[in-house]
Image (cartoon, coloured by chain):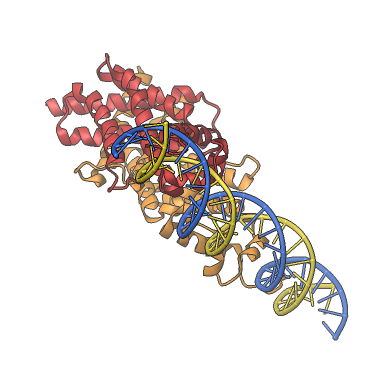
Chain colours: A orange, B red, C blue, D yellow
Amino acid sequence: MAGRTKLDMRIILEKAAELVDRNGLEQLSLNGLAEELNIKSPSLYNHFDGLEGLKQQLAIYGTEQLYAHLLPAVIGSKGDEAIHGLSRAYIDFAGIHPGLYEATNRIPDHSDENLQHVQKAVVKLVMQVLQSYQLEEEMAIHIVRGLRSILHGFASLKRTASFQLPVDLDKSIPIAIDIFIEGIHSRVQQQEE
Amino acid sequence: MAGRTKLDMRIILEKAAELVDRNGLEQLSLNGLAEELNIKSPSLYNHFDGLEGLKQQLAIYGTEQLYAHLLPAVIGSKGDEAIHGLSRAYIDFAGIHPGLYEATNRIPDHSDENLQHVQKAVVKLVMQVLQSYQLEEEMAIHIVRGLRSILHGFASLKRTASFQLPVDLDKSIPIAIDIFIEGIHSRVQQQEE
DNA sequence: TATTATAACTAATATGATTAGTTTTCACAA
DNA sequence: TTGTGAAAACTAATCATATTAGTTATAATA
């Protein structure tokens, strides 16, 4: 069941990821991608529904890659150490794959179960890292949101070169995370009182 | 000294801001903007250098607006209260002006002094809010970066509807900020020891 | 070996950015 | 009051890209 079979989705997404990492998500075009793949751009419509469809697939692919990058960073550790490991891996991924990371920040299409699924997996991973603090369910969710905000915000501001003061950027995330962790500890104490 | 004088930069940027808030920054086009302004798109080149030039101006305009929105939220208060006021105002602005806020997150053009200037003003404002904690200079910068990361990250994730768990979103930011503040207090104590 | 589905192709259209060159109109100086 | 020049509009044309429609080639499988 194939025609002039040459490409599959995997190859296309890998090339697209390469391009967006090099030139930014905004610069992604079907013409440019097709040229890299040695086909004509209308042929891409056999694989996904136009440029928006490609970006949607790229969001899923990127989120899978992010998940795969985070997982080994948290297994085998717990508590503060796990949060630091997760944070390092997160910022690391966004630095190595700036365009692909950007692609993951797509408004979720509620009709696309695949995207929903991988996004939930990442959130669940972060939730698990917090389990050892034995937080109340609702508080845990607020804290996960805070943690994700720090990580995404830092990655995003770093990419846009928005931090300009002459202080080592690599120290900022561990310090910010440490401060947040200390805050969590205070919360845990309060909760136990 | 004017010709068929009708438009100035201010009017153009206000209309552009309106459009991006309604349709998103990606959807901004010179054709669409020109149509709204009842002119033809090539006429816009008299005011700025193409679509990229418009986005650059919009970044400056948006950052000015953001600054103006933050300022009244911090004057007259200090310490924890000022941080909460700042945070509320920041998230508030991003919610009211999603497209304009998006436009402010532009990779700074180091040759554009106007953009540099307004961006520095916002950073300075946040720095001032932290002054009452009497942190060491370098630590203050790390903490400003952490605070900006939480705020930008939360605003950004909120906009892309990335928080999906059934817990009140409006409570998350004050809680995350509270946790961060508690962490700062711990740091201040350590610093004094 | 014939069929069929897949995925390539070409051709054509539409939209938008951009450039070049032209026209209009207002402010100001003569 | 009138003439000049600059600013900002205009039209026309080009180019890049997305997209659609319809066609062709090929590989798996019946």
Viewer can see residue A85: no
Kindly indicate the quadrant of the structure image that contains residue A8.
bottom right
Furthest-left residue in this view: B193
Q: Residue at x 41, y 52 (%)?
A: A98
Position of A139 relative to A88 (above/below): above
Q: Residue at x 61, y 68 (%)?
A: A40
Q: Where's the C terminus of chain B, which quadrant?
A: top left
Viewer can see residue B20: yes
Furthest-top residue in this view: B76
Q: Position of residue C21 (x, y in %)?
A: 48, 58
Q: Position of residue B130 (x, y in %)?
A: 23, 25
Q: Residue at x 19, y 26 (%)?
A: B188
- Of the pair B71 and A4, the residue shown nearer to us: B71
- Of the pair B123 and A91, the residue shown nearer to us: B123
Q: Would residue B72 be found to the left or right of residue A7 on screen?
A: left
- Of the pair B96 and D1, the residue shown nearer to us: D1
Q: Where's the N terminus of chain B, which quadrant?
A: top left
